[in-house]
Image: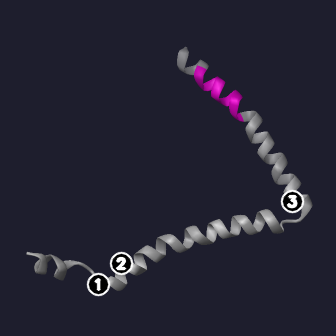
Amino acid sequence: MWQSLSEQLPPLSVWVAAALSFVLPLFFSWLMQILHKQADPPWLQKERHQQQQKKQTTRPSQQQKQKTARSN
């Protein structure tokens, strides 16, 4: 039974390629985020910080609107 099952499974190289196709993009995305945090010019860092602050201040009001809409 194991022999028939193992004959139907793809070879190890296919499993490795599938795993790498998932892991490598995640790794490079993580690496690019770190590099951007450290290497972006100061003016760009200020803009991103301001954008994050705007998002944080607008989120609670949106949540309150959703809560009031649900209760009505």
Q: Quick check: 66 above or below 57?
A: above
Residues in magenta, as a range = 59-67
Specify the principal SS of the magenta part.
Answer: helix
Q: For marks 1 and 3, give the one nearer the viewer.
A: 1
Q: Quadrant of residue 65?
A: top right
Residue 7, horizontal then vertical, whole percent: 17, 82
Query: Which secondary structure, mark 1?
Result: loop
Left or right, 44 with reference to 7: right
Label 2 crowd (10 A; few <14 / some 14-19 / many >=20)? few
Q: Earlier in the sequence, mark 2 or mark 3?
A: 2
Give the CA distance from mark 2 to mark 3: 41 Å
Query: Which secondary structure, mark 3?
Result: helix
What is the three-letter code of the residue carrying label 1?
A: Pro
Left or right, 14 with reference to 36: left
For image coordinates 54% across by 20% down, the residue present is: 70
For image coordinates 65% across by 24% down, the residue present is: 64
Q: Quadrant of residue 58?
A: top right
CB within 8 Å, label 2 to label 1? yes
Q: Could you tell me how many numbered marks the image carries?
A: 3
Q: Earlier in the sequence, mark 1 or mark 3?
A: 1
Disc 3: which residue: 44
- Residue projecting furthest to the right: 43
Disc 1: which residue: 11
Q: Quadrant of residue 68?
A: top right
